[in-house]
Amino acid sequence: MNNYALMISQLKTPEVMKQLNHIYGQRDGMMVEQSMRYSRLLKKHEEIVGTSGSVYMISAPGRTEIGGNHTDHNCGKVLAAAVNLDTLAAVTPRDDQMVNIHSEGYQPLSVSLDDLDVHEDEKGTTAALVRGVAFKMKEDGFKLGGFDAVMTSTVRGGSGLSSSAAVEVLLCAIFDELYNGNKLTAKRRAQISQFAENVYFGKPSGLMDQMASSVGGLAYIDFKSDDPKVQAISYDFAAKGYALVVVNTGGSHDDLTDHYAAIPAEMRAVAAYFGEKNLRRVLPEQFAKAIPQLRQKLGIPHADRAIMRAAHYFDENRRVTDQAAALQSDNLDEFFRLIIESGRSSYCYLQNIFAFNDHQELALALMLGEQKLRCDGAWRVHGGGFAGTTLNFVPQKRLDSFVAEMEAVFGAHSCNILDIRPVGPACIRLGE
């Protein structure tokens, strides 16, 4: 039996099956699916890399935003969860400083860790994320080394489940596992990932995506300070008879960067009126009293949207706290009411449902979600908005019909049925 045949056989051992079950959950067919997926990736690694030693199977999850739409970038509160869709890599260390990545569906890339400068022509690419993660880890005193990785992902780009955060957290986990003995904390891993995305990748994201992927499980996260407060919340929606379904409406994120960037910028413009850097440092009642002056200071009519976005922020922070309390007291009806209220606030006040009048796929998905779930369940915009996805809490007894009806509108495989993943990045070492 060669080394790769041995590793594939190890996937069927009780110990490894238990790990996979913990990572991916117990939905029907999941274990067979993941075992086959891991086997295929090992075979691809043998074809491309080949090794007589161990292979590290390292996984990092996508995330779902459950509460707190566009609050993290102004030091607000969120409810977020890691999900059982992930980016998975079969990795072996190298004895030089080269990182070679072969990712399914993409051209191979090579990055030298001897050059960790920002490359403007790499922005928006995985190569930029490699350099950004490596730079920050080196700056923090962590060891670096090269590796060969063969990667695959069920967190599709544009799915609204943060494929970029999954890759960033995965890269941190690879460097940490191979060269540092797993010394990174979940918070620091998330912060390094955000740095790579902001500075090297060129996307001005908050910290929610990376924190949810890095921490795992369902978490209440308060970004008030540089050391975010993270509180795990134990709640099993499946046990209560509901599935989380993210519907990808197929809208394009192209040319939307300015629309995304305008939201935190307008919120901070309101905060600046009070001499603060972000809205978290402004009292809601202080803001409410100053609306007439804000209209004059910021300039009508442009001030009006900034004021409404700020109002959404203050109410959304309150809702996140109330959502967490509802789950902790097992009051699912109240939780669903707050989810729907959050979605309506995003639609009316945050105004991140569509950027152009001739692209209203997201609005259509919300309308359909309301029609199908208004008597039992909940629906809202998911993630950044403008294009992309909706989040739906669907009764299990109506799950098949919901998926069929939504995919009839938005296309095959537009629905992702999610389970909450209890852990962040995970490693299974094979071939020992």
Image (cartoon, grey):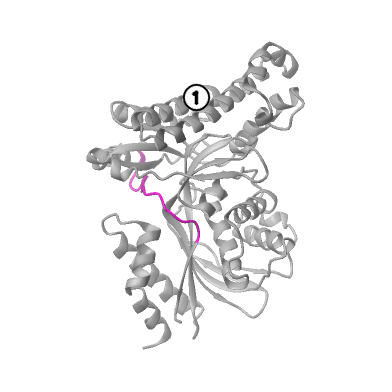
Residue in the image at 60% along x and 66% along y: 176
Residue that protrudes farthest toward the front in the picture: 329
The N terminus is located in which quarter? bottom left
Per the image, the residue denoted by label 1 is 345
Q: Nearer the viewer, residue 121 or 346?
A: 346
Question: Where residue 12 appears, x then y in whole percent?
Answer: 32, 73
Does 331 sit above or below residue 63? above
Q: Which residues are magenta?
A: 409-425
Residue in the image at 41% along x and 81% along y: 4
What is the count of numbered marks?
Answer: 1
Residue that protrudes farthest toward the left in the picture: 397
Q: Nearer the viewer, residue 233 or 22?
A: 233
Q: Nearer the viewer, residue 379 or 47?
A: 379
Question: Where residue 44 appears, x then y in whole percent?
Answer: 44, 74
Q: Is residue 104 shown to the viewer in this render?
A: no
Question: Where residue 317 appears, x then y in whole percent?
Answer: 55, 30
What secondary structure characterizes most of the magenta part? loop
Report if residue 135 lies within the magenta region: no
| Circle 1 Cα neighbour tier, 10 Å, few/some/many (<14 / 14–19 / ≥20) | many
Q: Quadrant of residue 309?
A: top right
Does 175 sit above or below residue 236? below
Report if residue 419 lies within the magenta region: yes
Task: Name the amino acid type tagged 1.
Answer: Ser
Residue that protrudes farthest toward the right in the picture: 275
Does 419 sit above or below residue 288? below
Element under label 1?
helix
Q: Is residue 157 shown to the viewer in this render?
A: yes
Residue that protrudes farthest toward the top in the picture: 292
Question: Where residue 376 appears, x then y in whole percent?
Answer: 29, 30
Residue in the image at 34% along x and 68% along y: 17
